[in-house]
Image (cartoon, rainbow, N blue to C red):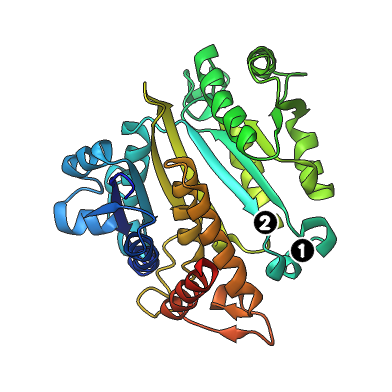
Amino acid sequence: MPASKKILFLAGDGIGPEVMAQVRRVMDWLNQTGRTAFEVEDALVGGAAYDAQGTPLHDDTVALALAADAVLLGAVGGPKWDASLPFELKPERGLLRLRKDLELFANLRPAMVFDALAEASTLKTELVSGLDVMIVRELTGGVYFGQPRGISALPNGERRGVNTQVYDTHEIVRVAKVAFDLAGKRGKRLCSVEKANVMESGLLWREEVTKLGADYPEIALSHMYADNCAMQLVRQPKQFDVIVTDNLFGDILSDCAAMLTGSLGMLPSASLGAADAAGNRRAMYEPVHGSAPDIAGQDKANPLATILSFSMMLRYSFDLAEEADLVDNAVRGVLAKGLRTGDIFQPGKTLVGTTGMGDALLAEMAQLAN
């Protein structure tokens, strides 16, 4: 029997509880078949937490997250809270506080194209079929956090907006280590992206990543300017395996790569912290899609992005590659059989709801496991 692991479930708002319920079914199946021994604890986040506790993230929930082996989050936010709450109490602040308090500095954003969905991309099918790119974005530094920042008045009556792009060596090295380690588990290719030609922070980034690369001789390290990387993602995306970049460029490039898939609702993500002495990292996993309040409670939501986020948890937090492959292959199987939720529906396919997709996935996992 594998060692027990504690997972904190934060279902959140909108479709969050519905898609997380399907992950719970997958997790229960893995537990019942003896492949895993997960213990689940539930807590509130976002608008649901504000309604019940007066805050988008209670201190007790932070404590649970810090004590858990990994956190899985559904979605936060919705129009119910957008206009009525001050900025510091909005649902999204709960998510940001989780990232900050857990010190999650490395954001993993895969862009995957399942063969059955390749035609949904705006690019030619041959360019994206089988695409599997991982973008590692530095999450807690750079221009979004640098000081000084703000808008000030000038003596001539104009105004000036200032944001500071700043990185220290340790911030670059720690996220690059995550990227090198991921590349080692994948195709052993890492592309580091910056603007070293015009930005000193980019030059420092390139120098530090190059220096670190000497510790990973098995990884083929390359460098690319951010503007060229954006072009190459559209021109020839399968040239990339793992991309590591800063906060700003990662924000832009991950959204660009996400749209190569033609289906934002299929994409998972992970945010990782530093490794402890035993090599374990604090981690939070969540789908890229939002809370979709317009379809909440209607059994219409696509649970696959959240299920694939759970697969990332199996792979990157617990080194359960076999179980992660089982989940991923089951997703491929149900899509190959033509099952679609509304967001990915195509003419001639079979429309199913949230629960129906969960039923099909569990049946596929059972068939693959035999």
Q: Is residue 255 left or right of residue 76?
A: right
Residue at (44% x, 52% y) in the render: 286
Nearer the observer, 216 or 138: 216
Is residue 7 visible in the rendered structure shown here? yes
Location of residue 303 in the rendering, given as x and y in whole percent from the top left corner: 46, 67
Nearer the observer, 213 or 232: 213
Q: Residues within 10 Å of mark 1 (few under 14, many from 20)?
A: few
C-alpha separation, residue under disc 2 versus residue under disc 1: 8 Å
Q: Is residue 198 above or below residue 241?
A: above
Q: Is residue 162 left or right of residue 201?
A: left
Nearer the observer, 51 or 105: 105
Nearer the observer, 255 or 115: 115
Location of residue 330 in the rendering, given as x and y in whole percent from the top left corner: 55, 67
Q: Which residue is mark 1?
A: 122
Q: What amino acid type is highlighted by mark number 2?
A: Met
Is residue 45 visible in the rendered structure shown here? no
Location of residue 140 in the rendering, given as x and y in whole percent from the top left corner: 46, 29
Which label belongs to residue 259?
A: 2
Mark toward the start of the polypeptide (2 vs 1): 1
Q: Is residue 14 left or right of residue 44?
A: right
Q: Secondary structure at mark 2?
A: helix
Q: Secondary structure at mark 1?
A: loop
Location of residue 50 in the rendering, given as x and y in whole percent from the top left corner: 21, 54
Q: What amino acid type is highlighted by mark number 1?
A: Thr
Residue at (65% x, 18% y) in the render: 209
Residue at (35% x, 43% y) in the render: 70
Residues tagged 2 and 1 counted as in contact (Cβ below 8 A):
yes
Residue at (47% x, 19% y) in the render: 147
Q: Is residue 159 above or below residue 232?
A: above
Location of residue 191 by image quarter: top right
